[in-house]
Image (tube, grey):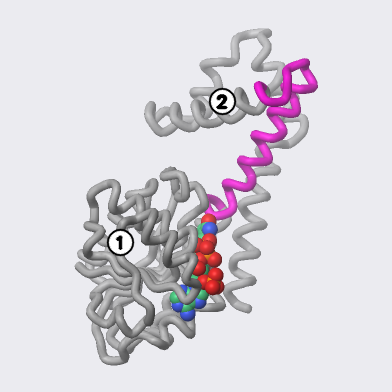
Amino acid sequence: MEIGVIGCGKMGTALITGAIRSGAIEASKVHGYDPYPAAADSFREATGASTVAELDSLANCDTYLLCTKPQQAAEALGALPANQSSLVISIAAGLSIDWLQKHSPSDSRIIRCMPNTPALVGEGAAAFALGQSATTADAETAKTLLGSVGIALEVPEIQLDAVTGLSGSGPAFVFMIIEALADGGVRAGLPRAQALELAAQTVRGAATMVSETGMHPGALKDQVASPGGTTIAGISALEAAGLRSALIEAVAAATRRSIELGHG
Ligand SMILES: NC(=O)c1ccc[n+]([C@@H]2O[C@H](COP(=O)([O-])OP(=O)(O)OC[C@H]3O[C@@H](n4cnc5c(N)ncnc54)[C@H](OP(=O)(O)O)[C@@H]3O)[C@@H](O)[C@H]2O)c1
């Protein structure tokens, strides 16, 4: 597999760094292109892969990873060799499989992905959907690339708006939760830096317990809420403030917005 990375910005660099580091792909098989020379330079430095000065020079690749901003994608795909049957994996937010198919060389097999920012620190939560002619082997390729910087689940394309609302937008919701927990710590008398460190590690630890024990989060919550204790007092305050409903509505609102943007 020869991989052409179109757009060597933050996400392209993070995905390829993770995939090379995990041994999923070899640096010698990856060739990046970015019109911005500084982006190409730092891609080479971070990944050990090569870059090319013109998109045409990626003609020998059989797999393309489209990592430009959505508004730059038409121009980038339009510059690919016209009569080549290759796999195009796109992480550009909001661009549908139909749109990608129309703008790619005619025999391309398309995979549309929705990664999230924690991919930049190797803890991403991504989902991907297969275009009509994409094969099981293509799905494995996407899973390997995205999975090297976190988890990657295959879903039908129609569910990608919900994925955008949950794991795409979710990091921002959790950043707000961490900030608010730290504020609570400061209000209760802790220094700011320690409150923030404790809040972030508490969220990380709780998340790890959910993934590693496989237990229902409600059961884990029940385990730490002793009768008449401190935790149930806090839980009661959260229920009164509507925390769960607020989060459900946040994911629903982000999903609706993703659908609206897709239609625009
Ligand atoms: N960041 C995230 O967490 C996240 C999450 C989910 C999805 N995504 C999606 O991932 C994609 C990339 O995001 P990013 O944060 O990595 O953006 P980014 O850092 O801005 O990277 C995009 C790169 O593509 C380059 N580019 C522009 N036109 C090009 C062309 N015609 N051919 C090749 N490269 C071109 C840009 O160069 P210039 O700087 O010169 O324009 C830039 O270096 C976006 O579509 C975004 O929607 C990102």
Residue at left 59%, top 68%? 259
Residue on which the image places disc 1: 49
Q: Position of residue 140 (x, y in %)?
A: 25, 59
**Magenta segment, which residues?**
166-194
Q: Position of residue 138 (x, y in %)?
A: 25, 66
Magenta includes 146?
Answer: no
- Residue 242 appearing in the image: yes
Task: Name the quadrant containing residue 77.
Answer: bottom left
User: Residue 174, labelled with which disc?
Assistant: none
- Label 1: which secondary element: loop
Spatial CA span between label 2 and label 1: 37 Å
Q: Residues within 10 Å of mark 1 (few under 14, many from 20)?
A: some
Q: Residues within 10 Å of mark 2 (few under 14, many from 20)?
A: some
Q: Position of residue 240 (x, y in %)?
A: 77, 30
In the rendered image of this protein, does residue 244 appear above or below residue 104? above
Tag nearer the camera, 2 or 1: 1
The mark nearer the N terminus, 2 or 1, is: 1
Which part of the image, by quadrant, shows the N terminus? Answer: bottom left
**Extreme residue in the bottom direction:** 83
Q: Are marks 2 and 1 in contact (CB under 8 Å)?
A: no
- Label 2: which secondary element: helix
In the rendered image of this protein, does residue 186 appear above or below residue 242? above
From the viewer's perspective, tell me whether residue 176 is left or right of residue 23.
right
Residue at left 25%, top 86%? 84
- Give the amino acid at mark 2: Thr
Magenta includes 183?
Answer: yes
**Extreme residue in the right direction:** 187
Task: Name the quadrant containing residue 42.
Answer: bottom left
- Give the amino acid at mark 1: Ala
Which part of the image, by quadrant, shows the C terminus? Answer: bottom right
Majority secondary structure of the magenta segment? Answer: helix
User: Residue 202, labelled with which disc?
Assistant: 2
